[in-house]
Image: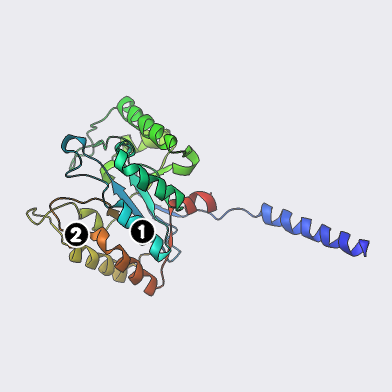
């Protein structure tokens, strides 16, 4: 009997050692020439829902805010899906957002940031020009990390970030990567990030049109590994019905019906090299 028990112990130890020795899966990234990923493991039928926000202190959050975050968290929880949140560091300093930020962490969603002050890193239409210096960007990110750590987060928990405005050039991307961050951006070809414009804007896209773009893109390309961004903001130029994030439940249900599963950036950190 003792010999049998001993044999099982040996087998168990060998099995555990073999399991521990198994290498992690290789992370497959679709990246641009700045080493910023816009698809994660495109060989998998998985999507990544990401949510950004900023608080414009100059107008007390009238235009840019994080007021949609609680609705987003509640919807994700109801649907059993984990999301990735990237508010700017300023949002962490706004008292009314403290409960929802704590809720994001407590409910197991990913929380990083989007810079501290939402710096525009380079002009639109001219990525050869820099609007920040290495020192100014480094100082902004240091401030961002300070507020993240105040909420109990460690660097290894928030090392994936979205550049501010989802807009950058080689210089700014290199600085952020030098500071120890890995960069992710919405999948090119999806227009969900256009949800800040009102009907008066020449490039305005209604919520219906934004959602239709997702399904057209899916039909033409698949959404395998796609990073789908929605602003968790209540822009004053749009009604509730015209805010794409308010249709999050419908987006999730449709993706599930088409066989997609969901991951967040915590999965990328924990399960892959």
Mark 1 secondary-structure assignment:
helix
Q: Is residue 18 above or below residue 142?
A: below
Q: Is residue 272 visible?
A: no
**Where does the image place residue 140, in percent across and percent down from the top left?**
32, 30
* Side of 44 where 16 appears, left or right: right
Q: Is residue 270 visible?
A: yes
Tell me which label, 2 or 1, sits earlier in the chain: 1
Q: Is residue 4 above or below residue 124?
A: below
* Tag of residue 208: none
Residue that numbered label 1 is attached to: 74
Which residue is drawn at the image coordinates 34% and 46% (left, top)?
86
* Side of 199 where 74 appears, left or right: right
Which residue is drawn at the image coordinates 44% and 51% (left, top)?
265
* Tag of residue 240: 2
**Where does the image place residue 35, in percent across and percent down from the top left?**
38, 45
Which quadrant is home to the N terminus?
bottom right
Give the colouring mode of the picture. rainbow
Q: Is residue 72 above or below residue 111?
A: below
Number of other residues with Cα within 10 Å of mark 2, as a class: few under 14, some 14 to 19, many 20 or more:
some
Taking the view exactly as shown, the residue that stands out farthest to the top is: 135
Number of other residues with Cα within 10 Å of mark 1, as a class: few under 14, some 14 to 19, many 20 or more:
some
Mark 2 secondary-structure assignment:
helix
Separation (CA) of disc 2 from disc 1? 16 Å
């Amino acid at each position: 009997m003792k010999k049998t028990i001993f044999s099982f112990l040996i087998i168990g130890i060998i099995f555990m050692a073999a399991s521990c020795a198994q290498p992690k899966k290789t992370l497959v990234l679709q990246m641009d020439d700045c080493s910023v990923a816009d698809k994660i493991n495109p060989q998998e039928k998985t999507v990544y829902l990401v949510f950004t926000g900023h608080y414009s202190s100059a107008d007390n959050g009238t235009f840019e805010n994080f007021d949609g975050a609680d609705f987003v968290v509640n919807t994700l929880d109801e649907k059993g899906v984990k999301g990735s949140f990237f508010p700017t560091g300023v949002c962490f300093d706004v008292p009314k957002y403290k409960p929802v930020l704590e809720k994001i962490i407590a409910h197991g969603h990913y929380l990083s940031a989007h810079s501290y002050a939402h710096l525009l890193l380079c002009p639109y239409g001219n990525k050869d020009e820099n609007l920040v210096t290495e020192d100014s960007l480094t100082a902004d990110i240091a401030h961002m990390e300070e507020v993240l750590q105040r909420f109990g987060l460690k660097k290894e928990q928030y090392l994936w970030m979205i550049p501010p405005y989802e807009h950058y050039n080689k210089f700014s991307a290199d600085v952020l990567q030098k500071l120890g961050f890995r960069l992710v951006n919405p999948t090119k070809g999806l227009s969900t990030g256009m949800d800040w414009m009102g009907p008066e804007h020449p490039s305005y896209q209604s919520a219906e049109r934004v959602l239709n773009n997702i399904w057209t893109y899916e039909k033409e390309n698949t959404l395998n590994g796609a990073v789908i961004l929605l602003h968790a903001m209540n822009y004053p130029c749009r009604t509730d019905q015209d805010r794409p994030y308010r249709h999050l439940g419908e987006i999730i249900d449709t993706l599930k019906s088409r066989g997609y599963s969901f991951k967040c950036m915590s999965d990328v950190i924990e399960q892959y090299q």
